[in-house]
Image (cartoon, helix red, strand yellow):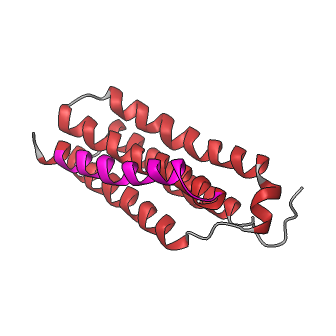
């Protein structure tokens, strides 16, 4: 076990384990935030495992998670808009912490990978991961100012 796989194991075990527990228990507002954070934590874990095992196929899985995870959260936000309007989730600190974790993982892997196509792919995954997580979290907490729900 090297440092990459150890870090991925800890991040996936602690982070995704806590997110799965949040999805399985508690009020609706905590469940939707945990669902959003689960995909935001799993994608950097897949990037770390790709580096640790030398398997570029895991990078494609991280790309898929970074793309479809926030989309799934937006679908939940739309379907549960009436239920979430009464008690909107507030998880700004956790969302920023997870986005920062994703940014650190992507930047470290970019430094290790070096310039080339793989680095561009990592940067795209990072942009999708961070941007999608922030947009989905904002949609869960009531949307953007000046827009109407409906």
Could you say where residue 112 lies in the image, as x and y percent from the top left? 21, 48
Q: Quadrant of the C terminus?
A: bottom right
Q: Could you say which quadrant of the image residue 119 lies in?
A: top left
- Decide whether residue 10 is among the magenta residues: yes
From this view, report whether residue 60 is shown above or below residue 108: above
Magenta stretch, overall SS: helix
- On screen, 140 above or below 7? below
Observer-nearest of 104 and 120: 104
Q: Is residue 2 left or right of residue 78?
A: left
List x then y, in percent, for residue 93: 49, 73
Query: Could you tell whether 140 is left or right of 82 in the image?
Result: left
The image position of residue 19, as x and y in percent, is: 45, 52
The question of residue 137 being in magenta is answered with no
Residue nearest the observer in this picture, 124 or 66: 66
User: How many numbered marks appear?
Assistant: 0
Task: Give the position of the N terminus as an image quadrant.
Answer: top left
- Taking the spot 79% from the left edge, 73% from the top edge, the residue there is 145
> In the rendered image, is residue 12 in sight?
yes
Residue 114 in the image: x percent, y percent? Answer: 24, 46
């Amino acid at each position: 076990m090297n440092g990459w796989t150890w870090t991925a194991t800890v991040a996936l075990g602690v982070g995704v384990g806590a997110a799965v527990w949040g999805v399985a228990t508690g009020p609706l507002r905590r469940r939707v935030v945990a669902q959003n954070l689960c995909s935001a934590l799993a994608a950097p874990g897949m990037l770390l495992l790709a580096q640790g095992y030398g398997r570029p196929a895991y990078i494609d899985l991280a790309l898929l998670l970074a793309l479809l995870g926030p989309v799934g959260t937006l679908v939940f936000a739309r379907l549960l808009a009436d239920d979430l309007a009464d008690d909107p989730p507030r998880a700004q600190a956790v969302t920023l912490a997870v986005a920062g974790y994703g940014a650190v993982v992507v930047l470290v892997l970019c430094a290790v990978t070096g310039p080339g196509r793989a680095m561009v792919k990592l940067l795209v995954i990072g942009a999708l991961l961070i941007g999608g997580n922030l947009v989905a979290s904002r949609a869960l907490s009531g949307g953007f100012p000046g827009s109407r729900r409906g």
